[in-house]
Image (cartoon, grey):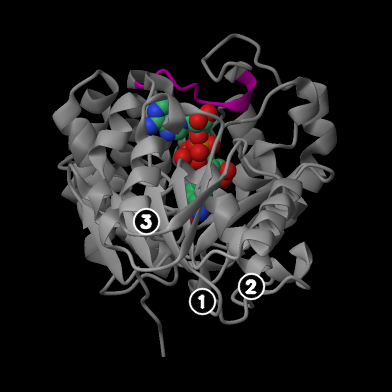
Amino acid sequence: MYRFTLPRDLYHGEGALEALKTFTGKKAIVCVGGGSMKRFGFLDKVVAYLEEAGMQVQLFEGIEPDPSVETVMKGAEAMLAFEPDWIVAIGGGSPIDAAKAMWIKYEYPEITFEEMCKVFGIPALRKKAKFCAISSTSGTATEVTAFSIITDYQKGIKYPIADFEITPDVAIVDPELAHTMPKKLVAHTGMDAITHAVEAYVSTANCDYTDPLALHAIEMIQADLVDSYNGDMDKRNAMHNAQCLAGMAFSNALLGIVHSMAHKTGAAFADFGAHIIHGAANAMYLPKVIAFNAKDEDAAKRYAKIADVMNLGGESTEEKVALLIKYLRGMNDDLNIPHCIKNYGADSYPTEQGFVPEDVFLERLPEIAKNAIGDACTGSNPRQPSQEEMEKLLKCCYYDTEVDF
Ligand SMILES: NC(=O)c1ccc[n+]([C@@H]2O[C@H](COP(=O)([O-])OP(=O)(O)OC[C@H]3O[C@@H](n4cnc5c(N)ncnc54)[C@H](O)[C@@H]3O)[C@@H](O)[C@H]2O)c1
Ligand SMILES: [Zn+2]
């Protein structure tokens, strides 16, 4: 038996934010990040609509990008004091993911972070509150997914919390919120979205319900992402939907080792002053992982199907896979994303020598590879890497060398 779970309601299109006016409840806590939603007036609208719905509203502000365990615990305390029956999270993946984890801790105050990370081990929620997610970036699709990514900064590791319990009750996908994204954010989140769709399509948990979502998302992202990056707002609107479709696919078909590697490298060099931004990490690793996974015959056929849907040409499966890799690398160039960690600058742009020194990378490599293998996303990857293979793969991602194993 398999399960396919999505939010009960999804409001989309311009003006979708107004759906908040129709909510019923007594108290809503609004979880939000550092300021972009306030600056652009969306936070005021959310509060006004919820008040119009007759609710008392409290804000939990200042959730940082790549949210920490500490922030989750603080937010849960605020919830325990205020006792909301709605949790409304607005922003990018970071505030929404943090709010999901706060929700678990609010419903089960005794639960530890370690217990939350037990894959598909979350007890039944919704005894205290329902959850609405309003996305302002076009990538993570956390508004429809069963995932939340929280960073343990002591360990320098991102942990995915995974359970259909944390799939939101309501998702609001209003493209107006995405209009204010700076170009860099469009690029990173867009490549995150295509990675979700590609990984979901080749995942060992793919199925008839997830495949059409993944393929259609890929087609749309191919048509829309680069133009959206270059300022076309109609394409920006389309990307907001495309990333959400990709999310519906991967929330149910799961992901693969591109994400395992992104999770375990993202904060691993934070002591050198920067993160490898999630979407950029995916963009760099995806072509390498395709080459690695394509040694598996079924996965290769699926990549070839993606190449067909994208109209990339090619005769044999091998040729099609190579064309897909080439196309994705071309997207990175169009979006000003480097091809490897060595060339990843602290500002995320391509540079001769990036912020991760070679000797530090090599020293931390065995541990990072071990953690990546242990990541929750590895189990559904079509080819299971050994420690040695994962180290080799990560090296290819550092130096931009060819994957021939
Ligand atoms: N839960 C999931 O299923 C899932 C999937 C993929 C990634 N993630 C996680 O999500 C996080 C990344 O989320 P993200 O890429 O959405 O970015 P983010 O939420 O970290 O936001 C990045 C920055 O963009 C700003 N911002 C957000 N929306 C904006 C807008 N419309 N206009 C202007 N500025 C805006 C924020 O204020 C912030 O400074 C990572 O922690 C990643 O691991 C989660
Ligand atoms: Zn992702």
Which residue lies under the disc numbered 2? Answer: 107
Of mark 3 and mark 2, the one earlier in the sequence is 2
Query: Distance from label 3 to label 2 (Cα)?
Result: 25 Å
Assign the N terminus to one quadrant of the image: bottom left
User: Callout 1, which amino acid?
Assistant: Arg
Q: Nearer the viewer, residue 14 or 371?
A: 14
Q: Name which residue lies at 19% across and 40% down.
A: 238
> What amino acid type is highlighted by mark number 2?
Glu
Position in image of residue 326 (x %, y %): 34, 32
Q: Residue at x 28, y 67 (%)?
A: 9
Q: Main secondary structure of the magenta part?
A: loop
Q: How far apart in space, not on screen, are marks 1 and 2 (Cα)? A: 8 Å
Tags 1 and 3 touching, CB below 8 Å? no
Image side of residue 371 versus residue 223, left or right = right
Return the x and y of residue 61 as percentages of the image width and height. 58, 39
Q: Which residue is mark 1?
A: 126
212 or 245: which is nearer to us? 245
Residue 337: x and y in percent read: 45, 22
Q: Is residue 84 left or right of residue 371?
A: left
The kind of residue tagged 3 is Gly
Asked if disc 1 and disc 2 are in contact, CB closer than 8 Å, the reply is yes
Q: Which residues are magenta?
A: 335-342
Label 2 residue SS: helix
Q: Quadrant of residue 168?
A: bottom left
Furthest residue toward top:
352
Of labels 1 and 3, earlier in sequence is 1
Residue ID for mark 3: 247
Residue at image position (73%, 55%) is 73
Q: Quadrant of residue 363?
A: top right
Q: Earlier in the sequence, mark 1 or mark 2?
A: 2
